[in-house]
Image (cartoon, helix red, strand yellow):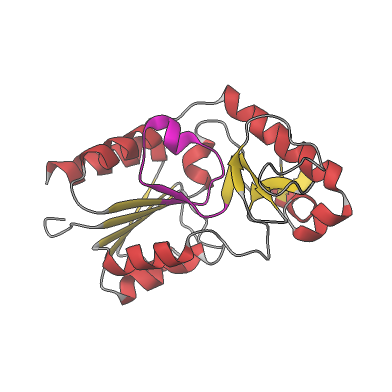
Amino acid sequence: MAAIRNIVILTGAGISAESGIATFRGPGGLWEGHRVEDVCTPEALAADAELVHRFYDARRAALATVAPNAAHRALAKLDAEWPDELLVVTQNVDDLHERAGTERVLHMHGELLSALCAACGERVSWADPLPPGSACASCGAAALRPDIVFFGEMPYGMDAIEAAIARADLFVSIGTSGAVYPAAGFVRTAKAYGAATLEINLERSAGSGWFDESRFGLAGALVPEWVEEVLSR
């Protein structure tokens, strides 16, 4: 730990589950009662835009009922106090990292509180319901959709993520399944560049074997402990 300067942290559904946000794949492969394939693919949007938009409207509205937990707050503290490079890469589409105070955060799978124009690519903040056919203020096309990276689409910020991992002395994965690519491959990339690797998860993940160290338990307990260890050095 003493030699660590640059840190990349990957967070997944497990860190927000303790705030009451359902993990992406629940029992039976469902997300909030829907088949993931019915609400998170380009084909689903084309086949039933009303269903897809209603689904994300409901997820967006639900954000008002939850709050950041101790793990989010601990990472915000680390972000505020860490003097060298730090990047929190989250697979989550909620805004709990930002509400906790983290500023150095990248949403690789998009954001619930954002809309994307399918015509011109403009991304705009959006907190209200988003009916199909909503017009883009930039180009005028009736093409706004949820700003969510669907299966089969390229995640955001991959060049920036890979560059940060290449410079990292420590890569930490928090609350991830280790099964969804490309994020599941980040630990191997980090190790190839010589970074130390740490997993904090409720239980063993599909990628646990790649990490130098794994700590199992609730993120709300383990992440604050780890942050205090890092800052004390």
Quadrant where the N terminus sits is bottom left
Instruction: Find out whether residue 90 is within the magenta segment.
Output: yes
Residue 212 or residue 159, whichever sits in front:
159
Q: Where is residue 106 in the image (x, y as percent from the top left)?
A: 44, 50
Q: Is residue 196 visible?
A: yes
Report how many numbered discs are placed on residues in the image: 0
Task: Looking at this view, name the residue that lies furthest to the front.
Answer: 139
Instruction: Please provide the residue range marked out in magenta.
Output: 89-109
The residue shown at (51%, 31%) is 19
Residue 147 or residue 118, whichever sits in front:
118
Q: In this view, does 47 lie to the left or right of 188?
A: right
Instruction: Find out whether residue 4 is within the magenta segment.
Output: no
Q: Position of residue 39 (x, y in %)?
A: 76, 49
Q: Position of residue 117 (x, y in %)?
A: 69, 50
Q: Where is residue 149 in the image (x, y as percent from the top left)?
A: 63, 55
The image quadrant that residue 179 belongs to is bottom right
Residue 130 or residue 183, whichever sits in front:
130
Q: In this view, does 27 lie to the left or right of 15?
A: right
Q: Is residue 25 visible?
A: no
Task: Looking at this view, name the residue that lies furthest to the right.
Answer: 47
The image quadrant that residue 231 belongs to is top left
Whether 153 is drawn above or below 108: the answer is below
Q: In this view, does 90 lie to the left or right of 3?
A: right
Task: Looking at this view, name the residue that lies furthest to the top.
Answer: 65
The image quadrant that residue 169 belongs to is bottom left
The residue shown at (25%, 73%) is 194
